[in-house]
Amino acid sequence: MIALPDSPDAFRDAAWDDVVPYYDALAAVPLDATSATVEPWLAVWSRLDTLIGEAGTLAMIAYTGNTADAAKEQAYLRFSMDIFPKLEEQQVRLARRLLDLGWTRDDLETTLRRFRTDIEIFREANVERFSQIEELSAGYQKITGGLSVEWDGEAKTIPQLQPYLKAADRAVRERAFRLGANAYLAQRDELADGFDRMYALRVAVAKEAGFADYQQYCFAAKHRFDYTPADTAGFHDAVRRTVTPAVAKLLEHRRRTLGVDVLRPWDVGVDLDAKEPLKPFSTVEQFVGRARTIFSRVDGELGQQFALMADEQLLDLESRPGKAPGGYCTDLSFRGRPFIFMNAVGVPDDVNTLVHEAGHCFHDFATHSLPYTWMRKTGHEAAELASMSMELLAMPYLVQPDGYYTPEEARVAWLEHLEDVLSALVHIASVDAFQAWIYTNPGGADRDARDRQWLALRAEFEQGVDWTGLERERVARWYRQLHIFELPFYYIEYGIAQLGALQVFRNAVQDAGNAVAMYKQFLALGGTRTLPELYAAAGATLVFDAPTMKELVDFTMERIDALRAGADAPFAGIVPR
């Protein structure tokens, strides 16, 4: 039908003028409302998208791996600012042609629904705005990726401060906390300048598309067909009522155990039951080697998939100067391989991050066999269910000789992880409530009002830590939350998925084999079913209400209490294979 390049390399240095002829050719192919013409056309369109998508992804991987490299930055910006924003217009153009035919098939119904929404909200005038937003996002990455502090005469990245936040010496923890916060505060005005411009562009995007505010626009753009802004407001309220009190109880236990009058923010990360901070690995090779075995213990096929990634060098794990902060899994969509990026420094959180991102990888592997790229894509709510469920499914196998910890160290790590599950829900709800306020309230345009609102919301959601005299440091926390800058409203999905993952974990406590089988069944569906159907396939439901949320909070607290008592009851029923 149309001759396409053999690999993404053909688009590595491409400009838009090199890309658009392929879409023009697809737009001119004769079609009728039969599978005989439509399906071959869809196959070419899908293949073209994966070729260009992988070329752009490789540019993004290279840039985030070294934000100080000007050539890599330019290559990344060429895709993010020029090619991908214009590509959206071509996607809408071809989707409109498909929908006008009236053709469908059962496993594409969810894709066609997304196409209809994309057509409804697309405005040509917004293409340039999205390009400008991408440029500002790259600027945020450059600023934050270049942050460093001096520690005993040695330059440290912000992620490299993490081990000091777990030090037994309270003064060391405080010093690390203040240095990390102050690094962001020193850039506050520059970061706020960028956000001001992002905010104005996003408000203009929503207005151009006919929405009352940017939150409503995002719900449509993110294809949130199965819940509403009112549901997320209910989620915030349910967290306040059920999770905030539970976390306050955990923090009070922490205060008593540490023997301090008040708990300060540098006290929340230190291990209560370990004499020295846990160090699960010393080298990246050790980190990866033990992960291979852990995933094989969860499921043989998943273990083989992770081993393939390690063998093919699809892991960039260590922290280094100039590397963008955070972690991600991305999909090399043409070759059908995932890629993991993170900033490991040898702390338990690194283990959680790797296992989390590996869950995304297993999702990518499971869906690559689906015929078209759009069928492989899920909303973030399903994507994060894959990753957060894997965090919990892998927990029983973190013990030596295969895993990272002695039995006592594992108990400490498990405790930390389950406590983090609950504290993360508090953080997630406050971040989502903050973004809702920004984009539905006139004060969102005012940088000082944003800072004040962040403080008000954090005081409301996060109780049990004394921030007296640290208001500026508390404000710094939202400036380091890259989602607020780069991926607005991509955060509630973590909370929805965490509650789904707890249900998967609860199922595994009863029958691990069946829980993993259902998990893999869910992965293989990709985006071919609705969100409630995908959660049901994994053995879970969507949770926005306080009563159901409380059941899961109580379930988690019971396991925390058992671990404190030294029991292995949290994993009763999960039998190592």
Image (cartoon, rainbow, N blue to C red):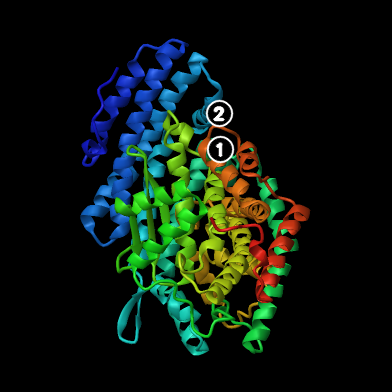
- Residue 79 against residue 464 in the figure, above or below: above
C-beta proximity under 8 Å, tags 2 and 1: yes
Q: Can residue 327 be seen here? A: no
**Which of disc 1 and disc 2 is earlier in sequence?**
2
Badge 1 marks a residue whose secondary structure is loop
- Quote the CA–CA distance across marks 2 and 1: 9 Å
Label for residue 223? 1
Q: Position of residue 392 (x, y in %)?
A: 57, 58
- Residue drawn at x 25%, y 22% is 3
In the displayed structure, does residue 289 sit left or right of residue 224?
Answer: left
**Amino acid type at image mark 2:** Arg
Q: Quadrant of residue 336?
A: top left
- Residue drawn at x 48%, y 68% is 349
Residue at mark 2: 113
Q: Position of residue 46 (x, y in %)?
A: 38, 29
**Amino acid type at image mark 1:** His
In the displayed structure, does residue 308 sit left or right of residue 495?
Answer: left
Q: Quadrant of residue 95?
A: top left
Q: Can residue 236 be seen here? A: yes
